[in-house]
Amino acid sequence: MSVLEFRNVTKEYRVRGGSRFRAVDGVSFTLQPGRTIALVGQSGSGKSTIAKMLAQLERPSSGEILLDGEPVARRGRGLTRYRGEVQMVFQDPFASLNPFHTIGHHLQRPLLLHGRASGSDVDEQVAKLLERVQLVPGTSMAERKPHELSGGQRQRVAIARALAPAPSILIADEPVSMLDVSIRLGVLNLLGRLQREENLGVLYITHDLATARHFSDEILVLYKGSVVERGPSNEVILNPQEDYTKRLLAASPNPETHFGTGRAAG
Amino acid sequence: MNDVLLSVTDYNIVYEVEQPVHAVRDVNLELARGEILGLAGESGCGKTTLAYGINRLLKPPAVITSGSAVLHDRDGTDIDVNALTSAQLRRYRWDKVSMVFQGAMNALNPVAAIGDQIDDIFTTHRPGMKRAERREESAALLDLIGVGRDRLKSYPHELSGGMRQRVMIAMALALKPQLMIMDEPTTALDVLVQRDILQEISELRRTFGFSVVFITHDLPLLLEISDRIAVMLQGGIVELDSADRIYRHAQHPYTQRLLESFPSLTGERGAFVRSGDGSQSNGGSAA
């Protein structure tokens, strides 16, 4: 299993007028097998810039991203190996699947490209993957096109695709915020179960503090590109130290504090 | 003056396509003056269709097949919304009932200053107003909503999402309507901005006494801001009760399921799936 280290990473963008905008400022964390880290913060806090750098879509201005202690290669076999180890689940399952291709096609490609299946057993592997994300029966699901699936089903396909190369790290960027509320927990619980089964290291990027708390071991609170608070999930949510974290918590709707907790006593 | 602002009776809306979709089914509700009613439900449950019906914004193939919506006007007359002619509709909409749409902040005209866009409302609905009066009224609205009159000449792209959404709310308030329908007005915004805007809405409600129908799937949010909550499922209202009772004593299994879909922020870790809460609170309700 691999360890992914994000070491003192800064990302600056040039803006009009020649000045620079620092989107991510000296952020460090380590993703280890079997542990989930949540990255929370409001829009513009740098969450997605971090995800883009982890996906190798952007390069850090300074600092390093290390896979098992080695800098990540920018091209060739090294990059392929990185992609085999680090996979993404994106926010919008309506945009992340190609409407022209079957579900099976979406899963065959990573399986074949990363040598996890051969031409003869690829269909069987696809069906297995689909069944692991509770899309059954896998063989008939594989024949469908994305438009025949609901949002929750599509997101399960996106998760299956991310698992296809058998990665050790999963980056989930707001994986449930586009889904209907009643199926969000189902998808999150599925991610949690797969994480335990595969001993994955997961980075859960979200603005939802409640799921961050229950879904992750550690929370990093990001504000204007910097980590302002970090710690075990329960600590950060129940006993926040920083003003910004407190403000964020106070602004989140919470019926428990609104109505008091005396529900059973009522 | 009547305490009820809006009565919706046996209301049905059908999308008359090849296989007709019964989007709103036998809805009955009474909205009190000054009340915030939350309308909760998932995509496709009919909450937006219902709101559109009340404002007569439906387009074919959507048809109001039966039932009525009656607005009890401040001056004592009853307005049968279904019977309004298009000329009457022009006066009814925005004047009596205004609407803030989902993603409304992107509904502003990008090539017109926001002051001019607010001005348009007065030019259309209050033709008697003088230019200077309109300008002053627009400026006052921007002050009221916390954007500030110095933004009158700003273009939408010069404002943040939260500020644009405030401008939309200012526009919805312009004619002092008796009912504001807000369809996911803060869904696209940050929690901090959302909190500010919600506070603004409840203060304005206290000041002006208008009623609000607040549509969202975010039940924890509704529980905090609403007086009463209607839960919709497949076009029908399955439960309608005070926010407090919905939270503590939800009766319908779907309401309970919806509540359980939101993990608790500060509750026990085991409450990730808050099953059991429903039965517990039912037991307590006997007291």
Image: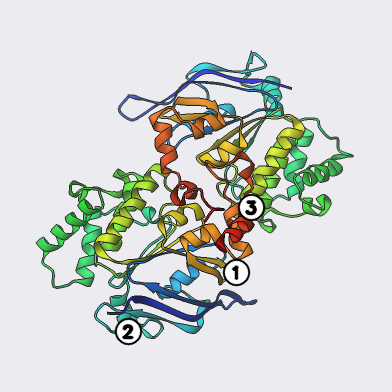
Q: SS at mark 1?
A: loop
Chain letter of disc 1 in the image = B
Q: Are marks 1 and 2 in contact (CB under 8 Å)?
A: no
Above/below status of A167 relative to B263: above
Which quadrant: the C terminus of chain B?
bottom right
Separation of residues labelled 1 and 3 (CA atoms): 16 Å
Task: Between residue A78 and residue A186, name the one nearer to us.
Answer: A186
Separation of residues labelled 1 and 2 (CA atoms): 30 Å
Q: SS at mark 3?
A: helix
Is residue A15 left or right of A208 when viewed as pictured? left
Is residue B53 left or right of B2 when viewed as pictured? right
Give the image location of residue B136, x and y in percent: 13, 58
Q: Amino acid at mark 1?
A: Gln
Say the numbered circle drawn on residue B78.
Answer: 2
**Do the residues marked 1 and 2 share a common chain?**
yes
The residue under label 1 is B234
**Do the residues marked 2 and 3 share a common chain?**
no
Q: Are marks 2 and 3 in contact (CB under 8 Å)?
A: no
Q: SS at mark 2?
A: strand
The image quarter containing residue A77 is top right
Above/below status of A69 relative to A35: above
| Residue for point 86% across, 43% down | A124
The residue under label 3 is A183
Task: Between residue A12 and residue B160, name the one nearer to us.
Answer: B160
- The answer to whether residue A138 is visible is yes
Which label's residue is closer to the chain start, 1 or 2? 2
- The answer to whether residue B109 is visible is no
Chain letter of disc 2 in the image = B
Q: Amino acid at mark 2?
A: Asp
Give the image location of residue A80, x and y in percent: 70, 25
